[in-house]
Image (tube, rainbow, N blue to C red):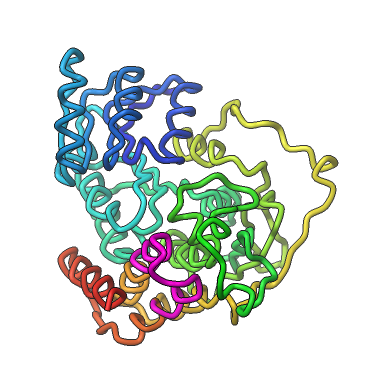
Amino acid sequence: MTTKSLSILGSTGSIGKQSLDVCRKCGYSVKALTAFSSVNEIEKQAREFKPEKVALVDEKAASDLKQRLSDTGIKVLSGIDGVCECAQLESADTVLNSIVGMAGLKPTLSAIRAGKKIALANKETLVAGGQLVMNEAKKYGVDILPVDSEHSAIFQCLQGKPANKALKKIILTASGGPFFSKTADELKNVTVENALKHPNWSMGAKITIDSATMMNKGLELIEAVWLFSVRPQDIDIVIHRESIVHSAVEYDDNSVIAQLGLPDMRIPIQYALTYPERFESPVEELSLSKIGKLTFFEPDYDTFKCINICKNAITKGGLFTAAVNSANEQANLMFRQGKIGFLDIAEKVQEVFECTPYYDEYTFEDVMEIDKFARESVMR
């Protein structure tokens, strides 16, 4: 196994912690760690993995961490510029970006411009700045390997793709979240606690709420358009409650190839890091006889409106996807703070979509301007 050296962005979150599990298993060297403000957790990680640099976005937390690690020789950085410095670290060949939300875009661009291989768990990078990111990746000859379980599954299924354009469609599976089969009337008064009870996956609060609204599936559709160069209409979404089939592809002869496994993020994380090779995994072996049955359903697009909002946004192009992403981030936060109801999330995202200006091409600064516009619109 070739030894790899990594910078892990968002190391104290769910994906970041599981990425470090993979590093332990594979013996990979961790050169940099970043987080927002989790001083205690990142101090433990830093002492174990002994990176060259760590960064915390929060200035006060970074100052505290600097004192705590003063005996180690590890350089402590702060702010988004500190995160970007970690993303560009010369000694790391791969950057695994598991930052949550729009905050992941600038570090991804920094890593690409430094020529790093990208293991991408931050879907917002492509949702908000897909055109910009893919153009930069092509310019610098950088590979972007998906870490999301669904996109990793699609990527794995495409490894046997014929040289001709034989791909017919992508089948993107969704767990359906905690509110599968619920009607809009039944969702009017659901609480944050209700929405955080995901049936299969252990994730951060923001992503879990996105799963409950099914906004996450809309964002994943957008990401798939960019990653696999397909049209929005070439992607079908299917509810699969067991989360065993992580996604599939259908070819022109109507053959369907799927990737299956237990719902554990360490499989897609490890594959992104070891590609094109495979190695023994810490994840339990899948037993189909124990699972017993696999079920599939059509999504309820009328109740879970965020899916179609995202599909309309990527179809229109420009910065509509960035706008709906930022609107959702703000509305998601406001719901978790108890300021709006569950169904208000989709309503606010739709309102922002309807008043977003069209951009044929855009810069990073344009993305940031739309981000500000969308958030302010939601808070009105």
**Vertical placement of 58 versus 205: above or below?**
above
Residue 146: percent from the left, percent from the top? 45, 49
Q: Residue at x 20, y 36 (%)?
A: 61
User: Image quadrant of residue 180?
Assistant: bottom right
Does residue 340 show up magenta in the picture? yes
Q: Residue furthest top?
A: 71
User: Could one spot residue 174 in this view of the protein?
Assistant: no
Q: Give the range drawn in magenta.
A: 329-348
**Vertical placement of 34 versus 212: above or below?**
above
Does residue 358 show up magenta in the picture? no
User: Could one spot residue 345 in this view of the protein?
Assistant: yes
Residue 284: percent from the left, percent from the top? 68, 31
Give the side of residue 283 with respect to residue 87, left or right: right
**Magenta region, main secondary structure:** helix
User: Image quadrant of residue 115?
Assistant: top left
Give the side of residue 324 with respect to residue 290, left or right: left
Given residues 232 and 125, the one toward you in this image is: 125
Give the side of residue 232 with respect to residue 43, left or right: right
Residue 174: percent from the left, percent from the top? 61, 61
**Vertical placement of 73 versus 188: above or below?**
above
Give the side of residue 331 with respect to residue 138, left or right: right
Given residues 176 and 338, the one toward you in this image is: 338
**Vertical placement of 187 versus 279: above or below?**
below
Quarter containing the C terminus: bottom left
User: Image quadrant of residue 338?
Assistant: bottom left
Given residues 268 and 138, the one toward you in this image is: 268
Q: Residue furthest bottom?
A: 354
